[in-house]
Amino acid sequence: MTAVVPDSFTAVDDSGRGFEDRDGVHARLAVYEKALSGVAALCRAAAGCDLEPRVPHLGDEPVLQDVRRELNHMLDLTDAFIREASASLEYASAGRFFRRFLVRGMLGSYRAGADVINSATAALQAADQRLQDSTVERERLAANFESVVLSVAEHVSAAATEMEAS
């Protein structure tokens, strides 16, 4: 059995004695260490809410290419979710409800979040419409009330004139 000691990149056997690097273990380990260091830096940036950086080329190893592709895809989806959420909510906050969250390509939790945002936007639009309808109704009632008060005032004035004449 062979163990690799990451601190020194020295390959050792079970007895602890070093042996030759016949399979390029040292070089491969250095490639993986460099790749993981870059991934860690990217994760720190993403955790700090900077979603712009992407994983650069990590090496020619298929597993490193997979890591790069999948991490970048995850960042792309997260970035798209944030941009779509921001755009649809910005429009809704201005009373412009036509801009819905574009759900194409959103899966799982991202799709569920998008559906919640679209439902909330629809509810805000319905509440805004009810408010507009109640404003129109209130204005109609106020105009009707004014008309009735003027009519009553005219009747009272006419009755007072008639009483004065008699």
Image: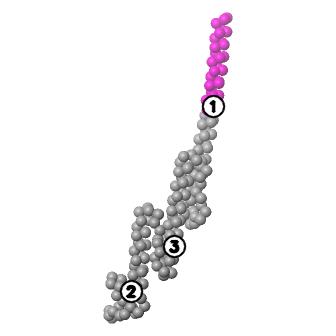
Q: Which residues are magenta?
A: 139-166
**Residue under circle 2?**
26
Disc 2 to disc 3: CB gap under 8 Å? no
Amino acid beneath label 2:
His
- On residue 70, the disc is 3
Nearer to us in this view, 132 or 141: 132
Q: Earlier in the sequence, mark 2 or mark 3?
A: 2
* Disc nearest the viewer among 2 and 1: 2
Residue 116 in sight from this viewpoint: no
Between the residue at mark 2 and the residue at mark 1, the CA separation in whole angstroms equals 86 Å
Query: In x, y percent, where is residue 100?
Result: 59, 54
Between the residue at mark 1 and the residue at mark 3, the CA separation in whole angstroms equals 62 Å
Query: In x, y percent, where is residue 13?
Result: 36, 93
Amino acid beneath label 3:
Glu
The residue under the point 43% across, 76% down is 35
Between the residue at mark 2 and the residue at mark 3, the CA separation in whole angstroms equals 26 Å
Q: For the N terminus, give its image quadrant.
A: bottom left
Tag 2's secondary structure?
helix
Nearer to us in this view, 106 or 109: 106
Tell me if residue 157 is in the magenta stretch: yes
**Residue under circle 1?**
141
